[in-house]
Image: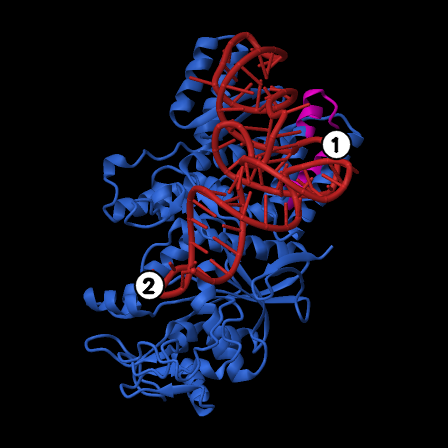
Chain colours: A blue, B red
Amino acid sequence: MPLRLYNTLSGKVEEFAPAADNTVRMYACGPTVYDYGHIGNFRTFVAVDILRRFLRQSGFKLQHVMNITDVDDKIIRNAARDKKTVQEYTRKYEEAFLEDMGSLNIERPEKLVRATEHIQEMAEFIAELEKKRIAYRTEDGSYYFRIAKFPEYGKLSKKDFAGMEDGARVDVDEYEKDSARDFALWKAPKEGEAFWESPIGPGRPGWHIECSVMSMKYLGDSFDLHAGGEDLTFPHHENEIAQSESLTGKIFSRHWMHVRFLLVEGEKMSKSLGNFYTLRDLLIKGHKPSAIRFLLTSVPYRKQLNFTFAGLEQGAKSVERLRTFDARIRMSQLPAGTNPSAQEAAAKAKSEMRAGMEDDLNTAYASAAIFDMVREANILADRGELREGDKTPLLEALHQFDEIFAVLKDDDAEKMKAAMEWARSHGILKESDIPADAISDADVNRLIEERNAAKKARDFARSDAIRKQLADAGILVEDTKDGIRWKRK
RNA sequence: GGCGCGGUACCCAAGUGGUAAGGGAGAGGUCUGCAAAACCUUUAUGCGUCGGUUCGAUUCCGACCCGCGCCUCCA
């Protein structure tokens, strides 16, 4: 079965497949690096990550380009305020963003591109548009896009701009624009702020032009898919389409994917509401990145996701259940042979996961499929009916799940520790707020050996004392019939 | 005002014209020297309200109520 994906452009769920080479050429709007990424940003990036992981699992190759917007009004203003160059100002946020992507196991796109490294190309693009009389220059040296020249304007966001053509002058006094809806391609320099020299004069690029230029440079005039947060549909993506298609006369992106906004405790996240969280805020509060990722993936991308701390706790528990099952299967000592029920459960999970993902990336359905398998296999294991030959298919199904969801590997502690270190070095946390270094695996294993010896000697007081000691260090010890299992809380 | 989305158990959430997935929490139980762990079982005669279509609707249609998003920088 092919992947069926909602396309904002058509307003319908459609079959999605790349146009050529079995390679999906996709562009995703990346971050504007003027601050640390917040949890809402990462919902979108995680959703795109889910898409790319599933495409690859489906056998496609990927050419995924993501921009880093390292120039915009806010950046230029803040840099000027801090008496820094644009590059100095943005670099740390860019690095932080990439680190945060790593914390959430978001894969790096094949190509990450900075807006500031494509400014000449943007100017050339605008010059071409001007040559076609689609762009025009105003007296101060800014350039605007003439929307009246692109009759399809509004086709993505389903807005009707009829009547917005020439003559429908609304509020144009301030900008010398021909029409109020015309948008900036290039902005003339402002006193005391950064600008670039270019063939069309000094200034800085508008926001929309960078994505047109960079996507087309690396993916061609037409490509398979363009993704971003729902808020970008208008005006950003609408403007990209206008710029690109009016220049080339070809369709720009064939498919548009928009990720719905995340709410926090039922309301749109905003600093004024006090419900604004960066990823780092959550990590230094002690939330595991795997739990955050799981919560972010648990609601399909086209549904509003209400981010709550209760939900985060639930996400952590869900991840724990899967990890525990994974460990249980791996370490179990089983009789030879296979059990048809287990084989069937694994096969069903595999096909149901695919079915769910193919249905417009229904991650909720896909995860239900793996939990079904976990329950069924646990029942068999409890009854002693699981066989050695069942391990591989069960673990394969788990692997298929984790190729998409990426939560099984437990490296939460080190990621959280890195966030703590960062917080300390930035004066966000005091030394005293930082937990002591986590106990090493070697020490844990040594203590568990000791506890085993005590248990064998039926010295339960000693054995329980050691377990308590480990518990205090954040290690949970579980006795199972296949041996000792431990994990970090 | 324009465009769009959603209201399913205590919470999150899937889904279908034929009788409600999954996760969390609660309750009960199993295993265990013990265990906060692990595992199992269980929890919606009902899917916002009221009408309509139908042999049959949570699922289709209509109206209404409620919540949310976009329309301006915003993932």
Q: Please say whether residue A377 is one of the residues in the magenta stretch.
A: yes
Furthest-bottom residue in this view:
A131
Residues at marks 1 and 2 touching, judged by CB atoms closer than 8 Å: no
Q: Residues within 10 Å of mark 1 (few under 14, many from 20)?
A: many
Q: Which residues are magenta?
A: A376-400
Amino acid tagged 2: Arg
* Distance (Cα) linking label 1 and label 2: 51 Å
Label 1, on which residue?
A342
Label 2, on which residue?
A91
Q: Please, what secondary structure does the residue beneath circle 1 have? A: helix
- Magenta-highlighted stretch: main secondary structure? helix
Amino acid tagged 1: Ala
Instruction: Give coordinates of residue B44: x percent, y percent.
Output: 60, 25
Quadrant the C terminus of chain A occupies: top left
Which residue sits at x=80%, y=31%?
A340
Instruction: Give coordinates of residue B39: x percent, y percent.
Output: 62, 24
Residue A211 circle label: none
Instruction: Give coordinates of residue A360: x percent, y percent.
Output: 62, 53
